[in-house]
Amino acid sequence: MQAEPLPTPVTAESRRPENSTSLPADLRAAMNWAIEAAQSKKASGITVLDLQELKSFTDAFLLCSGSSAPQVQAIADAIEEALGRRGLRVWHREGYGGAEWVLLDYGFCIVHIFHERARHFYDLERLWRSARRIDIPDADANPNSKMSGAPQQ
């Protein structure tokens, strides 16, 4: 009797978009589009945690905050719309109704949009402190702030 092969584990590599040939540039581009969308809705505390070197289940987290439930939802909507226009569809969404912590899973990156109180409570930056951290200035501080090196579209 021959044993069945084990299923292929789901990893960041296997969850990446099929058309992603040069992921670092593609990842920066996707993050820039999401950052611009979040900034357009006045998100604060935008931070990218680069998880690529940690062999994690995803390549990056994008974290940002809103000061009210409607703002958190508006940020989520703007990010989904901006990435959707470029062919990137959210795989899984959680928390939209309560809008304390909205999670948008794109496979290669996971967007966390927090109400300010929830962000302080869960403190993902501390939990993932071994990740490379990139803090993005708020839109009102620098309207052209993005992650450097990303292709423009």
Image (cartoon, rainbow, N blue to C red):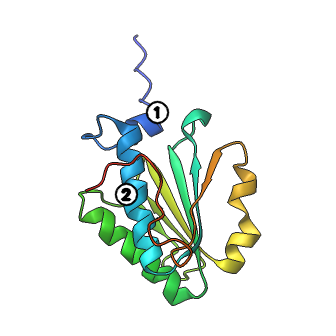
Quarter assignment of residue 50: top right
Residue drawn at point x = 71 percent, y = 79 percent = 117
**Who is closer to the viewer here, 40 or 52?**
40
Residue 5: image location, x then y, percent = 40, 20
Q: Which residue is mark 1?
A: 9
Q: Secondary structure at mark 2?
A: loop
Q: Is residue 135 above or below residue 28?
A: below
Residue 135: image location, x then y, percent = 61, 59
Mark 2 neighbour class, 10 Å CA radius: few under 14, some 14 to 19, many 20 or more = few
**Who is closer to the viewer here, 87 or 142?**
142
Residue 10 in view (yes/no): no
N-terminal-most mark, 1 or 2:
1
Residue 65: image location, x then y, percent = 59, 74
Outermost top residue = 1
Decide if residue 116 is on the left or right side of residue 139.
Answer: right
As shown in the figure, which amino acid type bears the numbered disc 2?
A: Trp
**Who is closer to the viewer here, 139 or 121?**
139
Q: Secondary structure at mark 1?
A: loop
Residue drawn at point x = 37 percent, y = 38 percent = 23
Q: Which mark is residue 91?
A: 2
Residue drawn at point x = 54 percent, y = 54 percent = 61
Residue 4: image location, x then y, percent = 40, 20
Mark 1 neighbour class, 10 Å CA radius: few under 14, some 14 to 19, many 20 or more = few
Decide if residue 134 is on the left or right side of residue 21.
Answer: right
As shown in the figure, which amino acid type bears the numbered disc 1?
A: Pro
CA gap, disc 1 to disc 2? 17 Å
Quadrant occupied by the N terminus: top left
* Mark nearer the viewer, 1 or 2: 2
Quarter assignment of residue 15: top left
